[in-house]
Amino acid sequence: FMTENPYFIPESLVTAEIETVRCIIENQSGQILLLQKDQSSQSPSILEFPGGKIENLSAHHPTIDQQIEAAAYETLEETGLDIPFSSFNKLEEFRYNFILANNALRRRVHLYHVKLDKDLVSIVTNQTLNKDGTSEDKHSGYQWVSKEELINLDVHGLISGNSKRYSAVLGTQNEGLK
């Protein structure tokens, strides 16, 4: 059971579930791409995998095709990387509860992995703007980290709750918070 804060949130208090995707993007050297949240986000300077909310759901639970489409869209929007749908491999799905604006919510994360065929790729953050001209994805930058660096960042509390479950791709013993 995973929460973004140290306090247990009873299931009976959860008012809604948010469907999201996250994508572990790994280059040929085995480095993992992390995006840094900007100072205007609710968790400034925290690092996370590219991803976001699955939009326009017609059913309660998104299909694999809807998940991959969202993963590809969010990756393109947040990084500028145009990755073919066939490159996305689903690793797992997990849920955790969190508090937002005094509401208890559940986030379901569909976690995907992409192995890039090269090391040198151009990353462009904050390219999608809202109607008011502000950045939609709210990232101040990015970094490529080794698997060891990712674990160290997590140990020091610098990885977002939506990006803590990465052991399936890294082959580590870290299972994130439960």
Image (tube, rainbow, N blue to C red):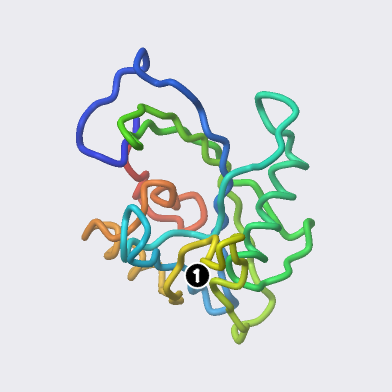
Query: What amino acid does circle 1 point to?
Result: Leu
Q: Quadrant of the C terminus?
A: top left
**Picture residue at 66% right of the left edge, 53% below the top:** 71
- The kind of secondary structure element at disc 1 is strand
Say which of 111 and 71 sits in front. Answer: 71
| Residue 175 occupies quadrant | top left
Q: State the image coordinates of residue 60 (x, y, percent, origin top left).
A: 66, 24
| Residue 3 occupies quadrant | top left
**Picture residue at 63% right of the left edge, 62% below the top:** 75
Say which of 162 and 125 sits in front. Answer: 125
Q: State the image coordinates of residue 1 (x, y, percent, origin top left).
A: 34, 30
Q: Residue furthest bottom?
A: 120
Vertical placement of 117 versus 41: above or below? Answer: below
From the image, tell me which residue sits under label 1: 33
**Picture residue at 64% right of the left edge, 46% below the top:** 90
Say which of 127 and 162 sits in front. Answer: 127
Judged left or right of residue 171, residue 128 is: right
Q: State the image coordinates of residue 8 (x, y, percent, origin top left).
A: 24, 26
Q: State the image coordinates of residue 57 (x, y, percent, origin top left).
A: 71, 33
Vertical placement of 50 versus 125: above or below? Answer: above
Q: Residue furthest front?
A: 132
**Picture residue at 36% right of the left edge, 65% below the top:** 150
Total numbered circles: 1
How many C-alpha atoms fall within 10 Å of the one at disc 1: few (<14), some, or many (≥20)? Answer: many
